[in-house]
Image (tube, rainbow, N blue to C red):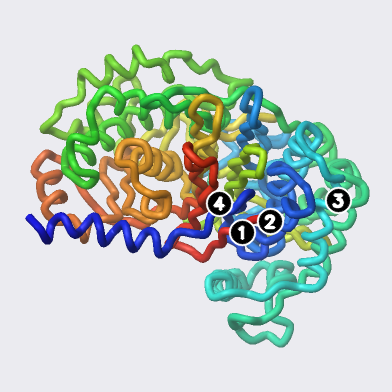
């Protein structure tokens, strides 16, 4: 017995050694300069929303694969007192979009797949409601990073060089991102983006209208005209970010807040937690077949209902029962404890036809306990690869998130259900899940992740690690995660090569188990006893915990 007892002790020591020094206000982001900009704003007396806005804009410069002003996302805000809220700045389809505008073989990298960008409006909306420091002071750090440049780290060198090699046909991308002497970027090189600096300076000085009705709008529309895209000046002028009520659930005494539709994140997370609450997970080890099985069955059910019901709420009615405890209880009674349910069995009314790191999440909390959980994206890494000529910023390819082929839902994972078909002015369904857990009104966990449909399950894994298994935050973030999305009917498990016996048992229960890496979840845990915030940058990718 002795050596076995030693294992958790060794884990604990490793975790303490890795844990970051506690601070008052904390920003955790994938981009080192991005996190540092946020921390500097906190030091200057800004609050967590100020810091989040500054970090988001800085990362449009320093993390161009996903940080953006040409994309969109969701921000969950939990104030120290009062109601949590969500800023939905998801992109929308242009007015000229149609239900059948896409074919299966269409390129994901064309002007047609660009949604009307939301980030600048979203940041301005969050700032108008919560900001303490002037807007301009939050944009200027990004201007400076673009103007004077920043030093590339290993991760960004790999990501940039890789993308440059595969985007030779995108002249403006090459002009803006290639190293001036034409060689490969090396770690420690300084990258400057003068066009983007000009664009950001306009946003700093004129506010979001520079982007939606001013000079930048003209540049964006000229880019669309040149490339056969659909976005017009009217689409930009009419774009709206919304403040919405979060999806609210509870899990073993914690309040859970996530983004509502058009993201499926909050709904599916609460749906799965409600199911899991009917089982005593802790009775079995974290990587036991039983815990993984139950999580997988909850995932399968949630993703089937996601396809069946969820889309932009302005276009589709989403049933209320998806997040109720009663519905989850009924579903949980149907889960077999010893056998995987074939995904086709939960397809019911949905007729089945025969047949990548590009989002980023950051977490912020300030000394007063105001917390921000923000996920935003260009959809693919570097989005559409289209840089607006002369304006230096990348456009998203978010129209990919619509169901392109109405009626075609396949076992391979294509979804063709009605709630998320393309329509003019509609927001495409997202899986982004910036999440905040709280107890008695005090924030306990801030988390979220990139990874497309895996996002919701990454967050589920972290919540289970922290709440059920009481893991320290760094361990909760770094530990292997699992993912099942209904179709394809397979369980992806990061720990498949470590937990061979568990995998064998899961296979004997009927699960098809494969191994795949999931997204990086830069998170913050707040010690409920002391109020001290501990940041955890995910070991999967470069990242930084910065603080006051
Ligand atoms: O909003 C969504 O769900 C997707 N566009 C996110 C894409 C994504 O996370 C890709 N990255 N890793």
| Callout 4: SS | strand
Q: CA distance from mark 1 to mark 3?
A: 26 Å
Between 472 and 495, the residue placed more toward the observer is 472
Q: CA distance from mark 4 to mark 1?
A: 20 Å
**Image location (x, y in percent) of residue 258:** 53, 31
Query: In front of the other: label 2 or label 3?
Result: 2
Q: Which residue is mark 3?
A: 203
The picture quadrant where one finds residue 29 is: bottom right
Q: Which residue is mark 1?
A: 546
Between 123 and 227, the residue placed more toward the observer is 123
Q: Is residue 88 visible?
A: yes
Q: Which residue is mark 2?
A: 39
Name which of mark 1 and mark 2 comes first in the sequence: 2
Q: CA distance from mark 3 to mark 4?
A: 22 Å
Ligand 1 near label 4 (Cβ, under 8 Å)?
yes
Q: Classify mark 1: residues with Cα within 10 Å, few (<14), some (14-19) or many (20+).
A: many
The vertical placement of 291 against 154, above or below, is: above
Q: Classify mark 2: residues with Cα within 10 Å, few (<14), some (14-19) or many (20+).
A: many
Q: CA distance from mark 1 to mark 2?
A: 6 Å
Ligand 1 near label 2 (Cβ, under 8 Å)?
no
Q: Classify mark 4: residues with Cα within 10 Å, few (<14), some (14-19) or many (20+).
A: many
């Amino acid at each position: 017995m002795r050596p076995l007892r030693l294992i958790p002790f060794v884990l604990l020591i490793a975790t303490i050694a890795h844990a970051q020094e506690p601070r008052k206000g904390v920003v955790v982001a994938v981009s080192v300069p991005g996190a540092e900009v946020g921390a500097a704003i906190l030091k200057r007396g800004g609050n967590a929303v100020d810091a989040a806005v500054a970090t988001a804009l800085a990362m449009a410069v320093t993390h161009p694969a996903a940080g953006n002003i040409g994309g969109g996302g969701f921000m969950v805000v939990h104030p120290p007192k009062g109601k949590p809220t969500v800023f939905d700045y998801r992109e929308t389809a242009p007015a000229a979009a149609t239900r059948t505008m896409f074919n299966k073989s269409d390129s994901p990298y064309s002007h047609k797949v660009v949604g009307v960008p939301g980030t600048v409006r979203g940041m301005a909306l969050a700032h108008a409601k919560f900001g303490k420091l002037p807007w301009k002071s939050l944009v200027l750090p990004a201007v400076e990073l673009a103007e004077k440049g920043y030093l590339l780290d290993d991760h960004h060198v790999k990501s940039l060089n890789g993308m440059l090699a595969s985007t030779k046909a995108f002249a403006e991308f090459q002009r803006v991102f290639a190293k001036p002497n034409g060689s490969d970027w090396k770690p420690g090189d300084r990258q400057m983006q003068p066009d983007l600096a000009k664009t950001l300076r306009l946003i700093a000085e004129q506010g979001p209208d520079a982007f939606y009705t001013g000079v930048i709008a003209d540049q964006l529309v000229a880019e669309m005209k040149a490339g056969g895209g659909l976005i017009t000046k009217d689409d930009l002028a009419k774009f709206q970010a919304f403040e919405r009520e979060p999806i609210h659930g509870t899990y073993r005494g914690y309040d859970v807040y996530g983004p509502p539709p058009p993201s499926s994140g909050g709904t599916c997370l609460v749906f799965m937690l409600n199911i899991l609450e009917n089982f005593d997970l802790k009775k079995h080890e974290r990587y036991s077949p039983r815990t993984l099985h139950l999580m997988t069955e909850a995932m399968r059910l949630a993703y089937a209902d996601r396809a069946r019901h969820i889309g932009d709420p302005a276009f589709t009615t989403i049933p209320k029962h998806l997040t109720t405890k009663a519905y989850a209880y009924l579903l949980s009674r149907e889960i077999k404890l010893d056998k995987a349910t074939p995904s086709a069995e939960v397809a019911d009314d949905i007729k089945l036809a025969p047949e990548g790191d590009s989002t980023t999440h950051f977490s912020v909390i300030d000394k007063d306990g105001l917390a921000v959980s923000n996920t935003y994206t260009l959809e693919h890494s570097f989005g559409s690869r289209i840089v607006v000529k002369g304006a230096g910023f990348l456009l998203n390819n978010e129209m990919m998130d619509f169901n392109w082929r109405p009626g075609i839902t396949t076992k391979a994972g294509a979804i063709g259900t009605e709630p998320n078909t393309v329509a003019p002015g509609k927001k495409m369904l997202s899986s982004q899940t910036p999440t905040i857990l709280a107890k008695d009104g005090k924030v306990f966990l801030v988390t979220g992740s990139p990874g497309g449909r895996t996002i919701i399950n990454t967050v589920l894994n972290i919540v289970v690690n922290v709440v059920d298994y009481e893991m320290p935050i760094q361990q909760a973030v770094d530990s292997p995660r699992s993912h099942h999305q209904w179709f394809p009917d397979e369980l992806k498990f990061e720990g498949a090569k470590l937990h061979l016996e568990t995998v064998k048992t899961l296979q004997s229960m009927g699960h098809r188990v494969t191994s795949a890496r999931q997204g990086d979840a830069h998170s913050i845990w707040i010690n409920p006893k002391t109020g001290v915030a501990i940041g955890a940058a995910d070991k999967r990718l470069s990242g930084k915990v910065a603080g006051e």
